[in-house]
Image (spheres, grey):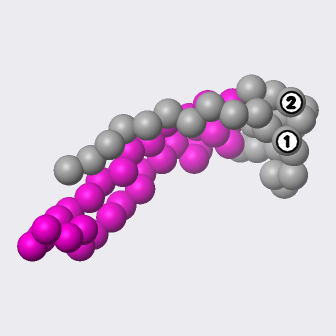
Amino acid sequence: MGARWTFHGTYCGGIPGATAPAGTPISFAGQDIFRAADGRFTEYWVVSDGLGMMSALGAV
């Protein structure tokens, strides 16, 4: 089971090495993956594009 998502927001500053000015619009995607057994969630993984976000902010 899983869910795909896209985050949209505005960079407020504070990430070391980022060259983007505060107020820069940003978005990145990811997905959540769940494993269930006996009607309960037993495992949960988050996969997100952190490198893409940091690239958009000029931090890498």
Q: Which amino acid type is marked by label 1? A: Cys
Q: Is residue 13 left or right of residue 57?
A: right
Give coordinates of residue 15: x percent, y percent.
81, 52
Q: How many labels does the image show?
A: 2
Residue at left offset 13%, top offset 68%: 39
Please identify the quadrant where the C terminus is shown.
top right
Give coordinates of residue 58: x percent, y percent.
77, 36
Is the Cβ of the residue at disc 1 closer than 8 Å to that at disc 2?
yes
Q: How crowded is mark 2: few (under 14 residues within 10 Å), some or many (20 or more)?
A: few
Judging depth in this view, the residue of 18 and 12 nearest the camera is 12
Q: How crowded is mark 1: few (under 14 residues within 10 Å), some or many (20 or more)?
A: few
The segment highlighted magenta reads 26-55
Give the farthest residue toward the top: 25
Give coordinates of residue 21: x percent, y percent.
90, 32
Residue 53: give its label: none
Whether residue 54 appears in magenta in the rendering, the answer is yes
Give coordinates of residue 41: x percent, y percent.
24, 68
Asked if one can make out residue 4 in the rendered structure from this viewpoint, the answer is yes
Whether residue 49 appears in magenta in the rendering, the answer is yes
The answer to which of marks 1 and 2 sits earlier in the sequence is 1
Asked if one can make out residue 58 in the rendered structure from this viewpoint, the answer is no
Q: Quadrant of residue 46?
A: bottom left
| Relative vertical location of residue 6 with respect to residue 12 in this rendering, above or below | above
Q: Which amino acid type is marked by label 2? A: Gly
Residue position for label 2 = 23
Measure the alpha-carbon separation of dots 1 and 2: 6 Å
Judging depth in this view, the residue of 39 and 42 nearest the camera is 39
Predominant secondary structure in magenta? strand
Residue position for label 1 = 12
Q: In this view, does 50 lie to the left or right of 11?
A: left
Q: Is mark 1 on a helix, strand or loop?
A: loop
